[in-house]
Image: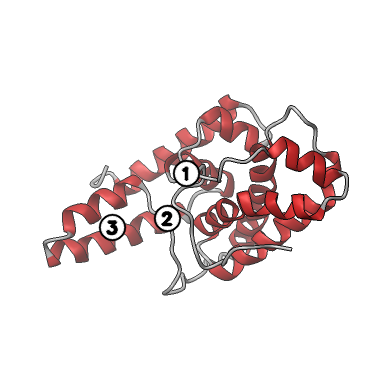
């Protein structure tokens, strides 16, 4: 049912191919399997990118990727036309990731990233890498900074972490994040504020 290589990542979360989602959804709701396959191909890479970015584990991301589209297949008949399919889809994958993150936090576990995993990086990490290109010492420092950032992100609550990554790693607006999480823009803003405050407290020398 699913297409694409789960190990291959897209350039950006919002860069799904330009397709008529509404027409494909209507056809799929009538039982057109090919239309559903085209809908999956239009969005599957963005779903995998988001899951891998949030979970930092290729294995967990693949599990979420499969479960997400299974739920889409099972519940597409409930989708309301006039709503944003992308928001509905991201809500499914984000809720699945939040469940994973909460279970990890309860067990106090974090995955070790696979050596071949392509993981999206934030603006600060990208800036540090660009500066480090011609300087071995800076390259070493860049890696250490990245580890520090990830360490602090793991200390955030699951919702704070998701909001921070959706805003800074994927470029979603606060209103979009609120829609994805099924909450308000103000609630998303408050979660982002708390996450940013915690990051600044731990990484004040870098920010």
* Tag 2 near tag 3, CB within 8 Å: no
Residue drawn 51% across and 42% down?
14
Disc nearest the viewer among 2 and 3: 2
Q: Is residue 71 left or right of residue 162?
A: right
Number of marks: 3
The residue identified by callout 2 is 120
Say whether disc 1 or disc 3 marks the residue closer to the N-terminus.
3
Quadrant where the N terminus sits is: bottom right
Task: State the image coordinates of residue 58 (x, y, percent, origin top left).
Answer: 54, 68
Residue 6 x, y percent position in the rendering: 57, 66
Q: Quadrant of the C terminus?
A: top left
Which element is circle 3 on? helix
Pointer 1 with pointer 3, Cβ within 8 A? no
Q: Quadrant of residue 48?
A: bottom right
**What's the residue at 57%, 25% (across, down)?**
186
Give the number of the disc on residue 145: 3
- Residue 152, compared with residue 174, is above or below; it is below
Tell me the crowding category of disc 3: few under 14, some 14 to 19, or many 20 or more residues within 10 angstroms, Cα based: some
Mark 2 element type: loop
Q: Earlier in the sequence, mark 2 or mark 3?
A: 2
How far across and down, in percent of the image, does residue 159 sit? Answer: 58, 44
x, y percentage for residue 93?
Answer: 65, 51
Residue pointed to by mark 1: 170
Contact check, label 2 and label 1, Cβ < 8 Å:
yes
Q: CA distance from mark 2 to mark 1?
A: 9 Å
Report the mark closest to the observer, 1 or 3: 1
Name the residue rendered at 69%, 39% in the picture: 21
Residue occupying the point 37% across, 48% down = 122
Of the pair 198 and 41, the residue shown nearer to us: 41
158 sits to left or right of 83: left
Residue 94 sits above or below residue 59 on the image: above
Foreground residue, 155 or 68?
A: 68
């Amino acid at each position: 049912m699913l297409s694409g290589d789960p190990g291959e990542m897209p350039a950006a979360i919002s860069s799904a191919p330009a397709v008529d989602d509404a027409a494909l959804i209507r056809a799929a709701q009538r039982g057109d399997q090919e239309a559903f396959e085209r809908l999956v191909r239009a969005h599957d890479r963005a779903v995998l990118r988001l899951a891998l970015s949030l979970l930092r584990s290729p294995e967990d991301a693949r599990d979420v990727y499969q479960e997400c589209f299974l739920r889409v297949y099972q519940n597409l008949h409930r989708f309301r036309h006039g709503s944003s399919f992308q928001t509905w889809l991201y809500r499914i994958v984000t809720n699945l990731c939040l469940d994973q993150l909460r279970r990890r936090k309860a067990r106090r576990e974090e995955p070790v990233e696979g050596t071949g995993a392509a993981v999206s990086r934030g603006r600060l990490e990208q800036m540090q890498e660009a500066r480090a290109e011609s300087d071995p010492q800076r390259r070493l420092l860049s890696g250490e900074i990245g580890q520090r950032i990830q360490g602090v992100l793991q200390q955030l609550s699951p919702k704070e972490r998701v909001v921070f990554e959706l805003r800074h790693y994927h470029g979603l607006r606060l209103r979009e994040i609120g829609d994805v999480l099924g909450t308000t823009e103000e609630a998303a803003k408050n979660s982002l504020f708390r996450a940013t405050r915690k990051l600044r407290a731990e990484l004040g020398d870098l920010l």
